[in-house]
Amino acid sequence: MIVSLNLRTSVHATEVNERVVKALMELLPEDLRNNVTVEVGSHEGYYGNPIEVLTVNIRDPQAAARTLNYILSRLGENGRRLLWETLEERVESSGDLYFRVNKQKAYLGSLEVDEGDDVVRVHVRFSGGRRKALAYYREALKS
């Protein structure tokens, strides 16, 4: 069902790289944190400012599903409710799910769904189509 999970965030020139990595790691189950590779890409902002993009790709379906469940369990009731209410908008025809988690709060150890720019983007790849994906995600949000 779940094929992979991708986490992605930006490190701006005003941010400390290690702190952003810590925020990113907060979205991973503790036993996976030492077993993932953080890919770093360099980009240039609109005004020529340097921006690093940090990406974690979890390609093992079991680890990806476990990571999604870990994130959902840490969101709290309000975050799960928000995802539940907006799930139709967040799931593509392929079944892929997209949502964002506040990066600053993640650094402090709390996960919260956010629509802003200072976020960790979560992309869950799903195999089986939208209808099966919606049922899967709804069940995951319930438990």
Image (spheres, helix red, strand yellow):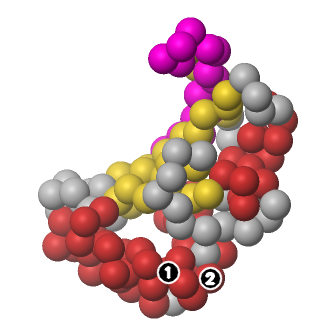
Determine the residue located farthest toward the front in the rendered image: 47
- Say whether marks 1 and 2 touch (CB < 8 Å): yes
Q: Which residue, given by chain and number where applicable, does mark 1 sit on? A: 80
Number of other residues with Cα within 10 Å of mark 1, as a class: few under 14, some 14 to 19, many 20 or more:
many
For residue 46, side relative to residue 107 (left or right): left
SS at mark 2 in the image: helix
The CA span between labels 1 and 2 is 6 Å
Question: x, y (%) of residue 53?
Answer: 59, 28
* Residue 59 belongs to the span the image colors magenta: yes
Quick check: 57 above or below 121?
A: above
Residue at the image point whose x is 18% and y is 66% from the top: 130
Amino acid carrying label 1: it is Arg
Residue at the image point whose x is 37% and y is 75% from the top: 137
Q: Which residues are magenta?
A: 45-61
Number of other residues with Cα within 10 Å of mark 2, as a class: few under 14, some 14 to 19, many 20 or more:
some
Q: Between 82 and 35, which is closer to the camera in this rendering?
A: 82
Quick check: 50 above or below 34?
A: above
For residue 90, side relative to residue 108 (left or right): left
Q: Which residue, given by chain and number where applicable, does mark 2 sit on? A: 76
Residue at the image point whose x is 30% and y is 63% from the top: 90
